[in-house]
Image (cartoon, coloured by chain):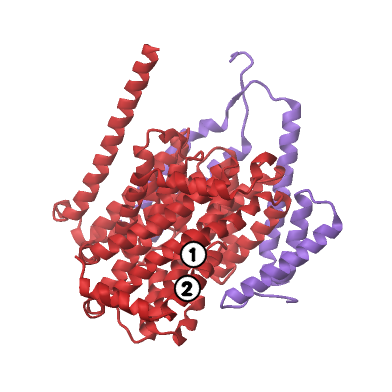
């Protein structure tokens, strides 16, 4: 699996080039700051600094950009935990338990849990990448629309666990989200639901809609509250509590490994990536947890599941980029642009001819993950002070910053208008007990579901036998059914145990 | 619960939300079918819209919850809260619609100042100073970060 000659060349390369290390820390810091700002995506942060890398050698340039990638990947979790704003769709599941933890005065712990899970997720994904780069890329090439559809359906299972007290309201919110996600021109070229608005042809802008549903609606609701954390004694900023949060994360290696595995596999699929992996990991963790009913109310396991999956997706996306030369998303597209700027072409040829460089990049990513732990600790310590800012300052400020972010994403008023409309819908949904997160999940998966359903129908010509020709899709559906079956068995066993202990007492 | 005292009240906001969800699902389905009834167009939209419609009808009764009779004080405080939320939402809407006419700088300054007042800050110098500093920092920060220009009036 490992080419030891290439490994020793990689070490030589890194040992002899100080410039490879110089850009690591600045890259991480840039990523953290940009990632924590609403509306500044990982791609945007990397794109801003791409021209700078023209004056660097190839290896330092890629290390600098991957450090921004790693930093921004975690940076997005900070506003997700503290303000319920998932700066990117990959931090969505972090809000489910991270924000309730912060509101309950466990903000330090939540940030520590998120940081440690991200660091370990990134580390594990690069270890997996080191060992599995070739087989993973072979699997990715075999994935067709039916397999993608199966993955999207797997993501939809999360709707069941987001429903809260009323399953009907949860399903309604989720299905409403799916409809919103399909607005615009579909993959077959049909235009629906745009109401004549030209910018809706590309669909409803997802990030502004997500910010409106999750964050702006919450802010409107908080107008009669004085602080994010109402109890003054709970508003402390504690380094010890952040570290305790990190220790909590380490206590759940199984959740982290499952998250990392899901992250690497889903992250390696072009166009799917971390925005789905965090949802599937959260859903699977909740389904298998003995305390499933506490998910969504501030269970650190939810944060661990989400963060380990979204950060490990980076390794998966890099595997596809290295092995196939295919960008899985915006960030890897920027990396490929940096490759091109240095006259390097990604893909199988690159892996075959430059294994030492690939290994060197993987090894510096180990170093990045370790550095992230220390830099991230200082960063979250400073960021946690937001809980001490009175909400009368925070509410208009965050609404204004979100508007800037929404404009920055769309380069037109379409982003801010979407933000506003969805903040009103989100506020109404919150007020009457509808899970807004279910709508967001539906919205994220709606387009993916429809696109792959149509492609599957086109390829199969409506023949059911096509399913039998796709062992990959059958395996995903079987895994999903096994997972649901085990959940039902576990839950029945738990109920029986509870009943027998009640009778015993 | 004492059945004699239990009355049903209408949650008007809930009804508006359900009307919005059900109405938009029906309108979307009709629009999609008007575009084309080909499978490639309605394979997901049609069943999902019908599902939303049925679920919406099932949930409709929840917009008329039973109540033991409202406490006048609770109702008054709820109304006051709703008015504040409404005012802030209206200010937010005006801010967004004025971004291109007033410019991001001026609109942000006015919205942050107004928002601070609506959220309970009464010291005029704090409102003025905070709104000014915040606008300067955010506007210059985003102008530096984002590769395309934001419409501005002063900055």
Of residues A130 and A314, which is closer to you in this image?
A130
Of all chains, the one bearing label 1 is A
Q: Is residue A51 left or right of residue A464?
A: right
Q: Which residue is mark 1?
A: A72
Have a look at marks 2 and 1 and say if they share a chain. yes
Q: Quadrant of the N terminus of chain A?
A: bottom left
Q: From the image, tell me which residue sits under label 2.
A: A46
Q: Residue at x 53, y 68 (%)?
A: A29
Q: CA distance from mark 2 to mark 1?
A: 9 Å
The secondary structure type at the circle numbered 2 is helix
Taking the spot 72% from the left edge, 44% from the top edge, the residue there is A226
Q: Chain of mark 2?
A: A
Instruction: Choose between A154 and B47: the one closer to the eye.
Output: A154
Question: In the shown orientation, is residue A375 left or right of residue A327?
Answer: right
Query: In the rendering, at what x and y percent does residue A412 appear?
Result: 57, 70
Q: Position of residue A332 (x, y in %)?
A: 38, 71
For residue A214, above or below residue B153:
above
- Residue at 28% x, 52% y: name it: A150
Q: Is residue A457 left or right of residue A497?
A: left
User: Is the Cβ of the residue at disc 2 closer than 8 Å to that at disc 1?
Assistant: yes
């Amino acid at each position: 699996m490992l080419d030891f000659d290439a490994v020793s060349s990689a070490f030589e390369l890194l040992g002899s080039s100080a410039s490879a290390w110089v850009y690591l820390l600045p890259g991480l810091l840039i990523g953290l700051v940009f990632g924590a700002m609403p509306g500044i995506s990982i791609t945007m942060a990397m794109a801003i600094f791409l021209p700078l890398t023209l004056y660097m050698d190839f290896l330092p340039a890629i290390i600098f950009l991957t450090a921004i990638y790693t930093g921004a990947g975690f940076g997005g979790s900070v506003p997700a935990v503290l303000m319920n704003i998932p700066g990117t769709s990959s931090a969505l599941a972090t809000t489910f338990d991270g924000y309730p933890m912060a509101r309950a005065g466990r903000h330090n712990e939540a940030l520590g849990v998120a940081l440690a899970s991200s660091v370990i997720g990134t580390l594990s994904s690069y270890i997996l990448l080191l060992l599995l780069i070739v087989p993973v890329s072979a699997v990715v090439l075999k994935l067709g629309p039916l397999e993608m559809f199966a993955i999207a359906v797997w993501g939809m299972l999360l709707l069941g666990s987001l429903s809260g007290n009323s399953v009907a309201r949860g399903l309604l919110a989720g299905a409403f989200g799916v409809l919103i996600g399909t607005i615009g021109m579909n993959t077959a070229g049909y235009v629906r639901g745009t109401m004549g608005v030209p910018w809706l042809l590309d669909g409803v802008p997802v990030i502004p809609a997500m910010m409106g549903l999750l964050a702006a609606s919450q802010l409107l609701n908080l107008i009669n509250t004085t602080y994010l954390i109402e109890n003054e004694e709970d508003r402390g900023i504690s380094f010890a509590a952040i570290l305790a949060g990190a220790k909590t994360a380490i206590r759940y290696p199984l959740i982290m490994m499952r998250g990392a595995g899901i992250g690497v596999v889903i992250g390696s699929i072009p166009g799917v990536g971390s925005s789905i992996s965090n949802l599937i990991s959260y859903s699977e963790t909740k389904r298998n947890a003995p305390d499933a009913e506490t998910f969504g109310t501030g269970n650190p396991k939810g944060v661990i599941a989400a963060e380990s999956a979204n950060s490990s997706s980076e390794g998966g996306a890099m595997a596809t980029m290295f092995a196939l030369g295919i960008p899985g998303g915006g960030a890897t597209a920027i990396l490929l642009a940096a490759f091109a700027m240095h006259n390097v072409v990604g893909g199988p040829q690159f892996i075959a001819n430059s294994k030492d460089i690939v290994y060197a990049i993987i090894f510096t990513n180990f170093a990045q993950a370790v550095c992230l732990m220390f830099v991230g600790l200082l960063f979250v310590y400073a960021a946690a002070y937001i809980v001490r800012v009175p909400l009368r300052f925070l509410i208009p400020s965050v609404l204004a910053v979100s508007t800037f972010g929404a404009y920055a994403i769309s380069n037109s008023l379409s982003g801010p208008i979407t933000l506003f409309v969805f903040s009103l819908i989100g506020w109404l949904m919150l007020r009457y007990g509808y899970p807004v997160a279910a709508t967001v999940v539906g919205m994220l998966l709606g387009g993916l579901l429809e696109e792959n359903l149509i492609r599957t129908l086109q390829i199969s010509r409506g023949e059911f036998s096509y399913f039998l020709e796709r062992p990959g899709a059958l395996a995903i559906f079987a895994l999903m059914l096994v997972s649901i079956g085990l959940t039902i068995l576990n839950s029945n066993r738990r109920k029986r145990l509870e009943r027998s202990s009640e009778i015993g007492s | 619960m004492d059945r004699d005292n239990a009355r049903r009240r209408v949650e008007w906001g809930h009804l508006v939300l359900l009307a919005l969800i059900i109405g938009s699902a029906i309108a979307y389905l009709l629009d999609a079918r008007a575009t084309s009834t080909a499978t490639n167009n309605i394979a997901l939209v049609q069943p999902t819209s019908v599902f939303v419609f049925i679920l919406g009808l099932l949930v409709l009764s929840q917009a008329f919850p039973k109540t033991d009779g409202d406490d006048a004080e609770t109702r008054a405080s709820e109304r006051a809260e709703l008015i504040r939320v409404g005012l802030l939402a209206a200010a937010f809407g005006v801010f967004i619609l004025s971004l291109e006419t007033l410019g991001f700088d001026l609109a942000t300054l006015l919205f942050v100042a107004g928002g601070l007042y609506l959220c309970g800050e009464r010291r005029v110098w704090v409102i003025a100073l905070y709104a000014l500093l915040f606008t300067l920092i955010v506007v210059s920060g985003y102008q530096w970060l984002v590769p395309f220009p934001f419409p501005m009036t002063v900055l």
